[in-house]
Image (cartoon, rainbow, N blue to C red):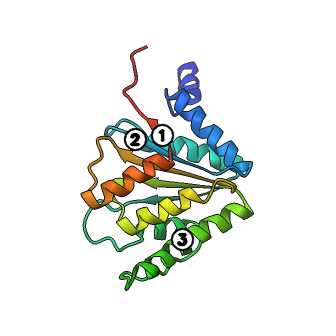
Amino acid sequence: MVVVAAIMRRPSFVGREAERALLSDALTDAVAGRGRFIMVTGARGIGKTSLTDAVVKVAEDRGVALAIGRAWPGAGAPPWWIWTEVFEALGESLALPRTLASDEARFACLEEIAQRVRARGAKAPILLVLDDLQDVDTSSLLALTLVARTIARLGVLVVATLPDPDPSPPESAVLIAALRREATSIRLEGLGLA
């Protein structure tokens, strides 16, 4: 019985204290109205999603609204898919055109997404997790760029994951490189032996 009790008390997440602390501090900043964009990178299977799951748990414990969008890794996902998932998780629908006639039409869609995120963050803190940026369409990456550039004074924390090396197609790789410049980066390395 003592062994079972010890196992039950064991934390569900081991290691990555510095990374978890950085994400917890970023969530605290968002609660205080100081938005942040954080990109978590590392080899496939290193623990990026587990780390983001840990900050989701902290957000839930603090009563922070949250939404998770996971990119579709194969062909066939419509444009704006990751943002559609985010807004559905928030109880909203997102109906944007699949094809755009002009750059102005595209920017109007980008601004629609960014405005909705900003409006949410102005009302109450929010955590958005975007998993697997390498599989996100270019329009959604542009929307993320606009979001990242406009949340500094709002209660928004955006955490995105990306494998390293980045397997993005060339048209996305340029946008992801620009996003890296907007982000606070957490690069996960292998856990050392204790």
* Secondary structure type for disc 2: strand
Q: Which residue is mark 1?
A: 185
Q: Specify whether 49 is left or right of 31.
A: left
Quarter-wise, where is residue 42 in the image? top left
Classed neighbour count for the residue bearing mark 2: other residues with Cα under 10 Å, few (<14), some (14–19), many (≥20):
many
> Could you give the CA–CA distance between mark 2 and mark 1, rounded to whole angstroms?
7 Å
Classed neighbour count for the residue bearing mark 3: other residues with Cα under 10 Å, few (<14), some (14–19), many (≥20):
many
* Secondary structure type for disc 1: strand
> Could you give the CA–CA distance between mark 3 and mark 1, rounded to whole angstroms?
23 Å
Q: Inspect the image, locate mark 3, and give the three-letter code of the amino acid beneath it.
A: Ile
Q: Residue at x 38, y 50 (%)?
A: 177
Disc 2 and disc 3 in contact, CB within 8 angstroms: no
| Residue 161 % position (x, y) | 42, 48
* Secondary structure type for disc 3: helix
> Could you give the CA–CA distance between mark 2 and mark 3, rounded to whole angstroms?
24 Å
Q: Inspect the image, locate mark 2, and give the three-letter code of the amino acid beneath it.
A: Thr
- 20 lies above or below 150: above
Q: Inspect the image, locate mark 1, and give the three-letter code of the amino acid beneath it.
A: Ser
Instruction: Of the two numbered discs 2 and 3 on the same chain, state the one appearing first in sequence.
Output: 2
Q: Residue furthest top?
A: 194
Q: Residue at x 54, y 71 (%)?
A: 113
The N terminus, quarter of image: top right
| Residue 137 % position (x, y) | 35, 65
In the image, which disc is placed on residue 113? Answer: 3
Instruction: Of the two numbered discs 2 and 1 on the same chain, state the one appearing first in sequence.
Output: 2
Disc 2 and disc 1 in contact, CB within 8 angstroms: yes
- 18 lies above or below 113: above
Disc 3 and disc 1 in contact, CB within 8 angstroms: no
The C terminus, quarter of image: top left
